[in-house]
Amino acid sequence: MGRSVENEKDMLLSDERYRNVLIVRFNALSDVAMTVPVVYSVCAAHHDKRFIMLTQPVASTLFINKPANLEVIAVDVKVKYHGIAGMRRLYRDMMEKYGIDVVIDLQGTFLTRILGAFFALRGVPVKRIDSGRSGKRALTRRYNKRMFPLISFRERYREVFYRAGFVFSETFKSLYEGRKADSSIFAEITTPKKDGERWIAVAPFAKYPGKIYPIHLMKKVVDEIASWDNVKVFLCGSAEEHKILVEWEKEYDNVISLAVKKYGFPMELSLLSHCDVMVSMDSANMHLASLVCVPVVSVWGATHPYCGYMGWHQDMQDIVQLNMVCRPCSVFGDKSCRFKDFFCLSGISPSLIISRVKAVLER
């Protein structure tokens, strides 16, 4: 990608002009999680700057062990900062408290464009993500698909900072700096990991049906894994999925559901850092596990890794998917199946997922 004269000027002057940097990414949880390696790395490379990250309340707790020059602010865009008037109020609050010098828009939707417009009217530069919509359309259209991998969203995030003049290398190792979290943090959930014991996390759900492996088949995966010696299984899910996971938990002494109560990301991620592998859909859980360096056996249906949403530093050989001419039909898994069966998911054998889990454990 060629550099414009404006971009070259930004790179030369950013150290002088940009002291207070506003980063915006409100939704979704998985996308916010994908910003972490990039944001932590740019903060480490520019420790003389102040970075202010605006995100949704639940995602704000993801930023564990954050750099000293990063401030994370939970923004409720549904109530206090709702709509155009809310974005104007947010703009005023940020300018009054931080004197923002540049805006890094990592979302690029209507809401953040409105927010950016208020800053631009004040003369504050706004750098916005290129979401690659044309490439996604070519990849997901019904006929004549262009089956080539798109640029990952982490690279897209990085490119926005680059255009603002922030050059940096990836120095992020994990939320726990490449180590495992202190086991005392998750003492409420379980006892510390024993020598020789293997911990396996299973996250069977996702937001949309096009991403969810059939529950009765996932139950077979859990049944097999739970039968192994020296294994403890942790089931990850939301309050809405609580009933199903609790029923699975009741069948085994070595299965624990994390959906029983809201432990919160600091506790759950600390536990996850001790796991040997996670089984997950193409969902936020895949990205959360990536942030604590846990290998993920990820199951893909209507979506596809080529769309750019692979977990950070995850291995392609751990992906479970079927090669079908209709895949991918959706970027987010939110479209109905034209064949009415989501065979891209139901056609995956539980034994295939189990074999991938075994392969990770044997490395």
Image (tube, helix red, strand yellow):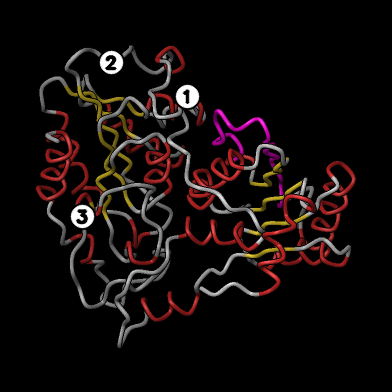
Q: In x, y percent, where is residue 27? A: 58, 54
Left or right? Give the position of 44 relative to 148: right
Q: Mark 1 points at which residue?
A: 267
Q: Which mark is residue 193?
A: 2
Q: What residue type is labelled 2?
A: Lys
Q: In which quarter of the image is residue 287?
A: top left
Q: What residue type is labelled 1?
A: Met
Q: Does the magenta run of residues contain 211?
A: no
Q: In x, y percent, where is residue 240? A: 45, 42
Closer to the chain start, of discs 3 and 2, is 2
Name the foreground residue: 273 vs 346. Answer: 273
Q: Which residue lies furthest to the front in this view?
A: 12
Q: Do the residues labelled 3 and 2 touch (CB within 8 Å)?
A: no
Cα distance between the residues tagged 2 and 1:
15 Å
Which residues are drawn in magenta?
A: 60-78
* Label 2: how many Cα within 10 Å (few below 14, some 14–19, many 20+): some
Residue under the point 77% across and 61% down: 115
Vertical arrangement, residue 87 with respect to residue 121, above or below: above
Closer to the chain start, of discs 3 and 1, is 1
* Label 1: how many Cα within 10 Å (few below 14, some 14–19, many 20+): some
Q: Do the residues labelled 3 and 1 touch (CB within 8 Å)?
A: no
Cα distance between the residues tagged 3 and 2:
28 Å
Residue under the point 48% across and 80% down: 134
Q: Does the magenta run of residues contain 67?
A: yes
The number of numbered discs placed on residues in the rendered structure image is 3
Q: Name the residue under label 3.
A: 320
